């Protein structure tokens, strides 16, 4: 069985609603991460951090400040003009942005 873009793999049609993630995107801080959410509250990304030096090294995590900066940049994406995003070079085998 192959999946078509208009169907899920279980052959049920996908809802006709847009798959966009509506702005504004927000950042919530959890115990060891920042979660970026879209305007409907859907979690889009988690950025993990660790501030205890020994655990940070062993777990290879970002500091809280580094994680917050990354989360802020992700949350700003809906405000970046689409043409700028299209002009960003992509790795050779990555999905293209044709929308």
Image: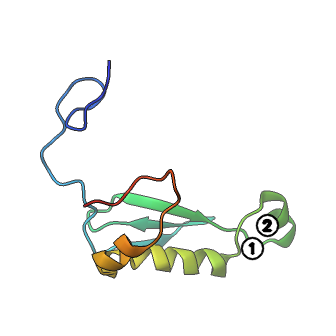
Residue 24 picture quarter: bottom left
Residue for point 48% across, 79% down: 73
Q: Quadrant of residue 67?
A: bottom right
Residue 58 in sight: yes
Q: What element carries label 2?
A: helix
User: Could you say where residue 10 lies in the image, as x and y percent from the top left?
Assistant: 28, 23
Q: Name the N-terminal-most of marks 2 and 1.
A: 1
Where is residue 69 shown, x and y percent of the image? 57, 81
56, above or below 63, in the image:
above
Query: What is the quadrant of the N terminus in the image?
Result: top left
Work out whether residue 99 or residue 41 is closer to the camera in this orientation and state it.
Answer: 99
Residue at the limit of the structure toward the top, as seen here = 1
Residue at image x 47%, y 69%? Answer: 89
Q: What element carries label 1?
A: loop
Residue ID for mark 2: 56
Query: Label 1 crowding class (10 Å Cα cut-off): few <14, some 14-19, many 20+?
Result: some
Q: Mark 1 points at which residue?
A: 51
Q: Residues within 10 Å of mark 2 (few under 14, many from 20)?
A: some
- Rendered location of residue 31, percent (x, y): 61, 65
Picture quarter with the C terminus: bottom left
Q: Are marks 2 and 1 in contact (CB under 8 Å)?
A: yes
Say how the picture is coloured.
rainbow
Residue at the far left in the pictured view: 16
């Amino acid at each position: 069985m192959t999946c078509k873009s208009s169907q899920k793999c279980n052959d049920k049609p996908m809802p006709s609603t847009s798959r966009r993630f509506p702005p504004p995107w927000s950042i919530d801080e959890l115990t060891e991460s920042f979660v970026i959410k879209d305007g409907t509250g859907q979690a889009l990304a988690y950025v993990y951090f660790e501030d205890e030096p020994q655990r940070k090294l062993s777990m290879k995590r970002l500091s809280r400040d580094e994680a917050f900066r990354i989360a802020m940049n992700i949350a700003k994406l809906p405000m970046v003009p689409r043409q700028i995003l299209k002009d960003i070079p992509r790795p050779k085998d990555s999905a293209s942005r044709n929308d």
